[in-house]
Structures are given as structure tokens and as C-alpha cells.
């Protein structure tokens, strides 16, 4: 039962002072371990006990007011971003755990119903982390207010730093795994059109072309256009049955699940009839049947790094100037890849 | 604000009154007003949240708390958080994110002074709940039942389980198996509510429940061997989607087909149950609705605070029928 009138009756130093029969100044000095001040151990203990009993907490608000810092960081992304999509969950966790550990609060700056009139909070905050495709109005507002920000898994605006996945390392590890197994004809199921503006789409594809060329592999047609999710069966028939690809690389895990379903409908077995490997080692690639060989995009590490770069930018007198940090991807080999079928 | 005042050649008090839309005992010309607003914009001025908290005693900030082990996107958490965030944003509030493994250390230094209210999701730390209570920060629980909340918004798991059972009995199933929750989840109300509803259906003899439901779900192969192969269960209900994904994989490895050899239903209509092969029949736990309602109840309280008794609200669960359920095999 809440009495609204009591909501703001937080215990203060004055309450402790009254309870202990000392002045507020004495309480403040004891609780702040002020060394230029002496008092008896008994009084000291009495004050500490009273503070605990009353649930007293120092008013960080007042402290921050004198420091001109809010110790608040905003997290921004597209209004349509799902927090469980791909590596987003891990990025968010990496960002928040790092900022919380440093004593900062994190607020959620995006949702479907955040209005464009109010793209960021009206009050002051210390910095921001931008994830996938935040609204241009929000980025513009950060620039106007000179709020420093870092981009993670995204490249836009004048960020203090960009923390990105090293897509080339992931694609190279896939290709070298497939070459080791003896594959020569490869198919690529590209991203759906929604993800085409994202840097990962272009970089995975460019790295694929480079790796295929340097390893002398052949790439079957269809790799350079957005995948049509309503025509997975058609894609698989063309790639595996008609063009004879023995391995399929999927842009992400969702596409891999659809391929798994389509293969099962068509009576194709994985990895006996073709090998399947995808980007994003997220739930539930490891417990699919078969468990999928996949590239781990290190979302948590990217989130942590982004938060650390932002903290550095806030705490150091010299602002960062938009350097790009790449975090390596690595391959986790499971049961969906094997040597190609003998002819 | 001092910068704005200097540039506009007015006093800080004038700037403050214009920016805060004060009209009582205060008037200024349209030109001055416009100059102040333009300068504010140009300088990128934003009011200090802290100062506002001290002077107005409200921040329009709501905190979101859960267990530090909670994954933000697990199960229905994603849709719940989205429902909470969009409702609070539409109401002009910001959402502070109070869950992460390191939030405990932060709670010491980032206290609730910023918060007008809070929303508690799955298993927040007792210290957090205690602190909210001590500081008299009003809070609503969504999909959880802890502390002294203004309201508890919970899923109607009995309804969901009854819908699953009646769908299966209409298809002709009589022998049921249940893949129960892991013991680490066992304190959550959904574990009890789903299980109790199933047990009472079995007691009414509308269905028969084969052994295996009474222990936490462990190996999916062992579970299917025991329930489907040895005891002849024709329908399996899974406490949640992850178990169903594992059961589907195990069935494939064991040469069992879904739904030909057994039907499968799970709770949580979340990624990727709709895109599995076969797509799964699932109970929809309406996370977004629950989040929206929880946020709405909190906003109502913040806009017109009244002392009132705690409410428990149950949100209906629906069943989405897909390809993983069918009539049992003819003997």
C-alpha cells in the first residue's frame, strides 16, 4: 500500500543526526570517512548503525549536480530492432554490464512508440551507444547536444569509435574449414533485403568472393541477391540439385533454420547430401538437428568494448576521433558439415 | 542555462520560465521567447536530470529490474520489454535498464533517486526489491510475483494448459507426457500453474499422464524413450520452447516422426518454433500485452497516485495450431 505523500521521504543525514543526537555535519564526516575529523569509535558505530537501520543512501544526485555529470548513458537502435534478434541480446548485455560496473545507468532509448518529436530524452545524459540503425533524428540530436557516442555493430554518424565484427575473419574460417573437408562447389544464401544496408551483408559477400577466388573454388549462381524467404526450396533445388553445390553458407542462423526445414521436406540430408554452415552462433543453432556449424559473432565482447571506449572518451580529456575496432569471429564446428558425397 | 541567458541578454530566471512554460505571474514578448528557444537549440542545451529530480521531485524515469542472470531476450522477455518500453516512451517516460550481472555493484552507487517507479520482471534480486520498498518507489511486477507491488500482471497459465489439453483430446489423444521445467526455474509461478493444471486434468481422468512428468526434464532422448516408446504416450507437452526444440532433434535422431509418431505442443510462441520442421503448435504467452499493461498500470498510478489494494491480473493465453499436432496413430 503506497501513500504517495511518503514517496519522497527518503532518510537523510538530518534523520540520522536526530536519532544519534549529533549534528548533520558529524554524520556527513563519519559516513564519508573524513580523515581530518576525529570522533569516538562509539559515536562512529552508532552513526553507521543508524544509517543502516534507516536505509540511508548518499544522495548521488546532489553529488552529481556539483560534478555536472549525470552518469547516465542511452542505448539507441532502430524503432524496429528486436532485442532478441541475432547478436543484439549479447551486445546489450555486454554494454549494460560494463557500464553498470563502472557506476553508470543505462536507459533504453528506442521502441516502436518513441516519437520523432522526442527522439532522445529532454534531460542531459553523458553519452550514448548506437546499435543497429537508430533514427537519423536521434543521431542528429546527439550531434546538436554534443553528446559523445560510440557505434557498435553499426557504422553511422560521427561516433567516437566504431566497434564492428571482423566479418572477413569469419568468412575466411568458413572457407578454410570447407576446403579442408574437400568441398569445391559452394552456394551462398545471402541476407534478406531488410539487412542489405547493414555493413555485414556487403562485407560477408565481398569476403566470400575474395576467399573463393584465392582458394580456386566455384560459387554457384544466386549468391549476389537478397534471399527470398518464400522460395527457399527453389533456392536449394537450384543450388544443390541443379548446380551441384556440396556446401551451403547462410548469411545468418534464421536462413539456416529455413534451409534445414526445406531440406527435410525435399528429402535432402545434412551433412550427407550437403554441408550447411551459418553466421551467428545463437540460440538454438547448438541444439538443432543436426547441431549447426556456425560462426560466433562476439556480440558480448563488442558490447563491452563499445562501452569501454565510451567510458574512455568520457573520462579522458582528449576525445576519441572515430577509430574503427574490429573484433574477430571464430568458427564452431558441429555436425552440419562433413566431407562432400563421393560421386 | 547561464550560457543561454548571456547570449540572449536576459536573466537565467527568464530562461528557466520560458523553457518550463511558466505562465503564472510571468509574461515575456514572443520575440524574446523565440530567441531563447532558438539559442537553446543552437547550444544543444538540455536540462539536468539531477537538478530536476531535486527541484521537481520527479524524473519521468522508470527502472526495469530482473535477475542479473536474466537474458534480456530469452523466451517472452523480449516482447515483454518491448511492450514496457513502447508504453513508457509513449507516455513520455524513459526506461532505465536495471538488469545485468554487474548491476549489484551499481545499485550501491546508482540509487533509486532517479526513479519515479519501477517494473520488476523475472526474479529481481531481493536487495533491489528491498531498496525499492525502503525508498517507497512504486512498482509493478510483470510475469513475476515478488515484493509489495501495486499490481501483478501474470500469464493465465491454467488457461493455456487447458487449451493445449483440450486441443489434444479433441484430436483423440488420451496418453500424455509432460516435459517439465528445469529445477532452476522451479520457483517461478508458471512452473506450478502449468503443472498443477495438468495434474488436475489427469485426476479428473479426462487424460492419462505417463511417468516422467514428476522430475525435471533432463535428456530428451531418455525422455522420449521412456514416455513415447515404453509407455505409449501419443502427445507430449513441453513446459517451454527450448525443450520442444531439443525433443524435435532427439525424435529425428531416434527415427520418430512428429506428428505421425507423437504430437508435440510447447509453451512460448517465440523464435524459432514457427520455422521449425514441422512448425510447432504452441501456447502463446502474451508477453507484449503483459508488458504494455504493466507499464500502463504504473503510469496510471504515477499520474494520479492513490492508495489502493494490490491487484493480480491474469492475461489470457492462446493456442496457435500448426503442424506438430495430429490425431494419434491407429494401433
Image (spheres, grey):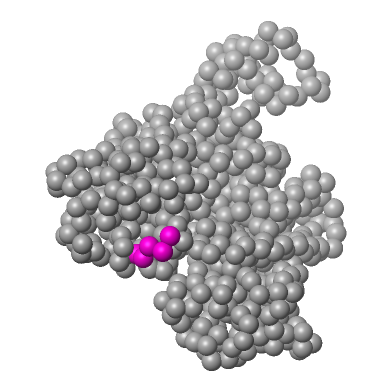
Residue A339 sits above or below residue A319 on the image: below
Rendering coords of residue B40 (x, y %): 58, 20
- Whether the magenta-drawn stretch holds residue A158 is answered as no
**Is B166 or B75 nearer to us in this picture?**
B166
Quadrant into which the C terminus of chain A falls: bottom left
- Of residues A117 and B260, which is closer to you in this image? B260
Drawn side of residue B176 relative to residue A99, left or right: right
Q: In this view, does A14 lie above or below A136?
A: below
Q: Where is residue B108 in the image (x, y as percent from the top left)?
A: 52, 59
The residue drawn where x is 21% and y is 45% is A218
Horizontal arrangement in the rendering, residue A97 relative to residue A31 (left or right)? left
Instruction: Tell me if residue B265 can be seen.
Output: no
- Residue drawn at x 75%, y 49% is B296
Determine whether B215 is above or below A301 in the image.
below
Q: Residue at x 53, y 48 (%)?
A: A82
**Magenta region, residue range:** A266-270
Q: Position of residue A309 (x, y in %)?
A: 35, 43
Amino acid at each position: 500500500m503506497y501513500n504517495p505523500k511518503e514517496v519522497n521521504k527518503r532518510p537523510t543525514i538530518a534523520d540520522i543526526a536526530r536519532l544519534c543526537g549529533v549534528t548533520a555535519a558529524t554524520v556527513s564526516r563519519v559516513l564519508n570517512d573524513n580523515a581530518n575529523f576525529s570522533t569516538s569509535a562509539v559515536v562512529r558505530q552508532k552513526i553507521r548503525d543508524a544509517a543502516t537501520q534507516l536505509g540511508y543512501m548518499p544522495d548521488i544526485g546532489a553529488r552529481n549536480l556539483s560534478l555536472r555529470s549525470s552518469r547516465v548513458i542511452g542505448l539507441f537502435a532502430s524503432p524496429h530492432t528486436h532485442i532478441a534478434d541475432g547478436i543484439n541480446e549479447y551486445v546489450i548485455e555486454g554494454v549494460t554490464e560494463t557500464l553498470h560496473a563502472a557506476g553508470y545507468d543505462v536507459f533504453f532509448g528506442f521502441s516502436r512508440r518513441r516519437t520523432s518529436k522526442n527522439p532522445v530524452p529532454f534531460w542531459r545524459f553523458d553519452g550514448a551507444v548506437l546499435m543497429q540503425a537508430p533514427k537519423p533524428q536521434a543521431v542528429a540530436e546527439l550531434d546538436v547536444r554534443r553528446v559523445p557516442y560510440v557505434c557498435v555493430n553499426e557504422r553511422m554518424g560521427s561516433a567516437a569509435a566504431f566497434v564492428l565484427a571482423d566479418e572477413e575473419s569469419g568468412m575466411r574460417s568458413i572457407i578454410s574449414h570447407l576446403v579442408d573437408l574437400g568441398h569445391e562447389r559452394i552456394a551462398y544464401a545471402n541476407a534478406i533485403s531488410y539487412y542489405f544496408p547493414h555493413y555485414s551483408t556487403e562485407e560477408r559477400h565481398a569476403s566470400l568472393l575474395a576467399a573463393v577466388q584465392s582458394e580456386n573454388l566455384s560459387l554457384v549462381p544466386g549468391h549476389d541477391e537478397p534471399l527470398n524467404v518464400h522460395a527457399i526450396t527453389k533456392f536449394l533445388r537450384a543450388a544443390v540439385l541443379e548446380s551441384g553445390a556440396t556446401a551451403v553458407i547462410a548469411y545468418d542462423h534464421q536462413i539456416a533454420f529455413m534451409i534445414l526445414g526445406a531440406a527435410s521436406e525435399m528429402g535432402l540430408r545434412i551433412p550427407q547430401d550437403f554441408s550447411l554452415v551459418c553466421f551467428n552462433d545463437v540460440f538454438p543453432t547448438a541444439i538443432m538437428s543436426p547441431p549447426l556449424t556456425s560462426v560466433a559473432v562476439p556480440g558480448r565482447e563488442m558490447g563491452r568494448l563499445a562501452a569501454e571506449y565510451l567510458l574512455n572518451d568520457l573520462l579522458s580529456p582528449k576525445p576519441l576521433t572515430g577509430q574503427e575496432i574490429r573484433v574477430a569471429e571464430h568458427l564452431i564446428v558441429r555436425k552440419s558439415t562433413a566431407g562432400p558425397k563421393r560421386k | 542555462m547561464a550560457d543561454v541567458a548571456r547570449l540572449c541578454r536576459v536573466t537565467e530566471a527568464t530562461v528557466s520560465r520560458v523553457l518550463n512554460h511558466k505562465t503564472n505571474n510571468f509574461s515575456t514578448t514572443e520575440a524574446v521567447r523565440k530567441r531563447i528557444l532558438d539559442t537553446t537549440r543552437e547550444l544543444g542545451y538540455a536540462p539536468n536530470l539531477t537538478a530536476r529530480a531535486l527541484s521537481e521531485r520527479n524524473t519521468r524515469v522508470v527502472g526495469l529490474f530482473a535477475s542479473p542472470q536474466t537474458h534480456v531476450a530469452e523466451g517472452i522477455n523480449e516482447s515483454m520489454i518491448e511492450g514496457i518500453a513502447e508504453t513508457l516512451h509513449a507516455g513520455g517516460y524513459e526506461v532505465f535498464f536495471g538488469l545485468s550481472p554487474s548491476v549489484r555493484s551499481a545499485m550501491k552507487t546508482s540509487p533509486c533517486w532517479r526513479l519515479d517507479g519501477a517494473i520488476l520482471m523475472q526474479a529481481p534480486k531481493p536487495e533491489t526489491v528491498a531498496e525499492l520498498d525502503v525508498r517507497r518507489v512504486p512498482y509493478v511486477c510483470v510475469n513475476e510475483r515478488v515484493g509489495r507491488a501495486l499490481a501483478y500482471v501474470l500469464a493465465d497459465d491454467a488457461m493455456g494448459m487447458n487449451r493445449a489439453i483440450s486441443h489434444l483430446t479433441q484430436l483423440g489423444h488420451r496418453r500424455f507426457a509432460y516435459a517439465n521445467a528445469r529445477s532452476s526455474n522451479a520457483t517461478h509461478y508458471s512452473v506450478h500453474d502449468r503443472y498443477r493444471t495438468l495434474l488436475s486434468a489427469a485426476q479428473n481422468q479426462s487424460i492419462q499422464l505417463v511417468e516422467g512428468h514428476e522430475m525435471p526434464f533432463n535428456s530428451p532422448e531418455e525422455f522420449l524413450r521412456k514416455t513415447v516408446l515404453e509407455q505409449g504416450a501419443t502427445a507430449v507437452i513441453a513446459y517451454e520452447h527450448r525443450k520442444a526444440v531439443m525433443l524435435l532433434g532427439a525424435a529425428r535422431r531416434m527415427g520418430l516422426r512428429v506428428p505421425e509418431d507423437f504430437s508435440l505442443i510447447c509453451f512460448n510462441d517465440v523464435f524459432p518454433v514457427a520455422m521449425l520442421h514441422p512448425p510447432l503448435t504452441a501456447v502463446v504467452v502474451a508477453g507484449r500485452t503483459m508488458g504494455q499493461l504493466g507499464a500502463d498500470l504504473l503510469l496510471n498510478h504515477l499520474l494520479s497516485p492513490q492508495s489502493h489494494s494490490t491487484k493480480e491480473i491474469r492475461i489470457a493465453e492462446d493456442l496457435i495450431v500448426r503442424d506438430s499436432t495430429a490425431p494419434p496413430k491407429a494401433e
